[in-house]
Image (cartoon, rainbow, N blue to C red):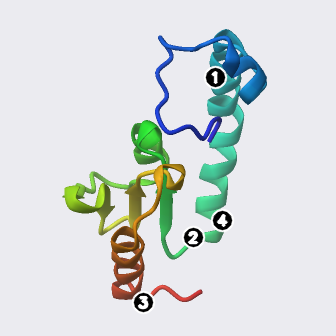
Amino acid sequence: MPLGKSSLNLNDWPDCYKELFGFTRDEYLSYYHYVKQSRYKLFINFMQEYKPQAVVCYGKEYWNDYEQLFVRGGDIAIDYNDFKTKVYEKSRVILTRHFSNGMPDKIVNFIASQLNKWDILI
């Protein structure tokens, strides 16, 4: 995704972000639009061609985008709030927090157990 950041608030974009991330708020919005128009097509093509066994997405800020890209046929999420994770059983998609906020063992173990439940081979 365009930017890995613990909390993305586009209304609070300090000047230091230009130095830290390499772009201003307006440049970020332009880049994000570009990503949606280009990279998302690549994701969709990849999913159709390679049919991955499962998809794990990191970063709550983009959960809506991930759902649009990877969740199929009206699949409904099971929320696991204790693990800050959503699971789409039919689509085999797991949405979770970004690891830059720390990834406690209980969340890693939960994701691993879900992948094991689906018999995912690595």
Q: Amino acid at mark 3?
A: Asp
Q: CA distance from mark 3 to mark 1?
A: 36 Å
Q: CA distance from mark 2 to mark 4?
A: 6 Å
Q: Nearer the viewer, mark 4 or mark 3?
A: 3
Q: Quadrant of residue 26?
A: top right
**What's the mark number on residue 23?**
none
Q: CA distance from mark 4 to mark 1?
A: 24 Å
Coordinates of residue 73 in the picture (x, y in percent): 32, 54
Q: CA distance from mark 3 to mark 2?
A: 15 Å
Coordinates of residue 91 in the picture (x, y in percent): 38, 64
**Within 10 Å of the Cα at label 1, are there few (<14), some (14-19), or many (20+) other Cα atoms?**
few
Q: Earlier in the sequence, mark 3 or mark 2?
A: 2
**Within 10 Å of the Cα at label 3, are there few (<14), some (14-19), or many (20+) other Cα atoms?**
few
Q: Earlier in the sequence, mark 4 or mark 3?
A: 4
Image-based side of 30 in relation to 63, left or right: right
Q: Which residue is mark 4?
A: 49
**What's the mark number on residue 119?**
3
Labelled pair 2, 4 in contact (Cβ < 8 Å): yes
Labelled pair 4, 1 in contact (Cβ < 8 Å): no
Q: Amino acid at mark 4?
A: Glu
Labelled pair 4, 3 in contact (Cβ < 8 Å): no
Residue at image position (72%, 29%) is: 21
Using the image as rendered, state which of residue 90 and residue 48 is in the foreground: 90
**What secondary structure is found at the residue carrying circle 1?**
helix
Q: Amino acid at mark 2?
A: Lys
Q: Which residue is mark 1?
A: 33
Coordinates of residue 64 in the picture (x, y in percent): 39, 38
Establish if 108 lies above or below 77.
Answer: below
Coordinates of residue 36 in the picture (x, y in percent): 62, 31
Q: Which residue is mark 2?
A: 51
